[in-house]
């Protein structure tokens, strides 16, 4: 593939993401109402579980490959958590403020759309599996850390978990759903990607970041660390090309807006986390195209 063709493919993959996020950002800056928490809850409770469920029951990917992708994602997140926790301790920073944001990226708002636009529906299938792993870990271990080690049982109340488990059950048994149900679930699931991208821009426009210098080098460290560990986990499990690419893209996404929401809820220095969200998202404008230059299949 020549450089012009590759550049065009990267632009085709990334432009919709940044344009839709910009729409959300400008919408709020113009003074129009956008209820970020309501839309986020709607996505997490209804739209994304439908997207995950339908992607799993429809996928043509071998179940063993999906299993290996899930295991590679779990190993990747575990490795990132261990290394990041050690670095935070060495730097004398607070684990409950920095660990969860630096481990769990924005796999929903950015990772899923990017996988779809860059790698097609097969890439999205892999990304959905990785996102589901992240969601389970984030709503258990992540919440446990940010909340000051309270009960991690919140994950059991998350529809994303049950959408994933139900989808895996249907996939394993080769079951399907009636056409009317499939169309309903598809319609609900299809609103997830544009909604999440617009919400990303709207949410960032409302943040009041602090400590931007520290946020820059921590975000840079997160990016390189996540790419390296994701590549190692993908290699260890022998993932095929698209699964390998989706794993790296998902694990290397910037800090999620939900990390700020959790920090605000549990009073874990939300301004510091806001700085990480803003800076890491700005870094991704350059980092994502560079990753795709390497990862896009020829």
Image: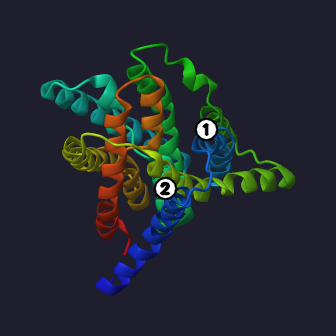
What residue do we see at 40% from left, 14% from top? Answer: 149
**Nearest to the observer: residue 34 or residue 228:** 34
Residue 103: quadrant of the picture: top left
Element at badge 2? helix
Label at residue 188:
none
> Where's residue 263, x and y in %?
42, 29
**Nearest to the observer: residue 144 or residue 29:** 29
Question: Is residue 191 rendered to the left or right of residue 212?
Answer: right
What residue do we see at 33% from left, 48% from top? Answer: 234
Quick check: 274 above or below 151?
Answer: below
**Nearest to the observer: residue 272 or residue 255:** 272
What residue do we see at 51% from left, 62% from top? Answer: 26
Q: Which residue is mark 1?
A: 164
Quick check: 35 above or below 80?
Answer: below
- Tell which circle, 1 or 2, labels the residue nearer the N-terminal end: 1
Element at badge 1? helix
Query: Can I make out residue 47 in this image?
Result: yes
What residue do we see at 30% from left, 50% from top? Answer: 279
Other residues around mark 1 within 10 Å, as few (<14) / some (14–19) / many (≥20): many
Query: How far separated are the C-alphas under marks 1 and 2?
Result: 27 Å
Q: How is the image coloured?
A: rainbow
Quick check: 179 above or below 146?
Answer: below
Question: Is residue 50 rendered to the left or right of residue 99?
Answer: right
> Where's residue 231, x and y in %?
28, 50
**Total label count?**
2
Question: Is residue 1 rendered to the left or right of residue 110?
Answer: left
Q: Which residue is mark 2?
A: 201
Other residues around mark 2 within 10 Å, as few (<14) / some (14–19) / many (≥20): many
């Amino acid at each position: 593939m020549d450089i012009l063709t590759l550049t065009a493919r990267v632009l085709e993959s990334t432009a919709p993401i940044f344009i839709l996020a910009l729409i959300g950002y400008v919408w709020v800056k113009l003074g129009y109402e956008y209820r970020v928490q309501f839309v986020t809850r709607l996505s997490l409770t209804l739209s994304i579980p439908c997207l995950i469920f339908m992607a799993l029951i429809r996928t043509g990917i071998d179940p063993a490959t999906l299993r290996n992708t899930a295991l590679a994602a779990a190993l990747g997140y575990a490795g990132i958590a261990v290394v990041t926790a050690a670095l935070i301790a060495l730097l004398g920073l607070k684990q409950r403020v920095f660990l969860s944001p630096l481990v769990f990226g924005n796999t929903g708002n950015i990772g899923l759309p990017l996988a779809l636009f860059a790698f097609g529906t097969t890439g999205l299938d892999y990304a959905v599996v990785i996102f589901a792993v992240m969601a389970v870990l984030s709503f258990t271990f992540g919440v446990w850390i940010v909340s000051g080690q309270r009960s991690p049982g919140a994950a059991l109340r998350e529809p994303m978990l049950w959408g994933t488990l139900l989808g895996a059950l249907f996939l394993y048994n080769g079951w399907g759903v009636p056409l009317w149900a499939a169309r309903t679930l598809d319609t609900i699931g299809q609103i997830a990607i544009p909604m999440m991208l617009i919400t990303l821009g709207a949410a960032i426009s409302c943040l009041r970041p602090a400590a931007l210098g520290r946020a820059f080098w921590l975000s840079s460290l997160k990016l390189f660390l996540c790419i390296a560990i994701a590549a190692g986990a993908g290699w260890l499990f022998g993932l095929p090309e698209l699964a390998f690419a989706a794993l790296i893209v998902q694990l290397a996404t910037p800090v999620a807006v939900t990390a700020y929401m959790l920090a605000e809820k549990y009073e874990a220095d939300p301004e510091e986390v806001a700085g990480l969200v803003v800076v890491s998202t700005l870094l991704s404008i350059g980092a994502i195209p560079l990753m795709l230059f390497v990862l896009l299949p020829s």
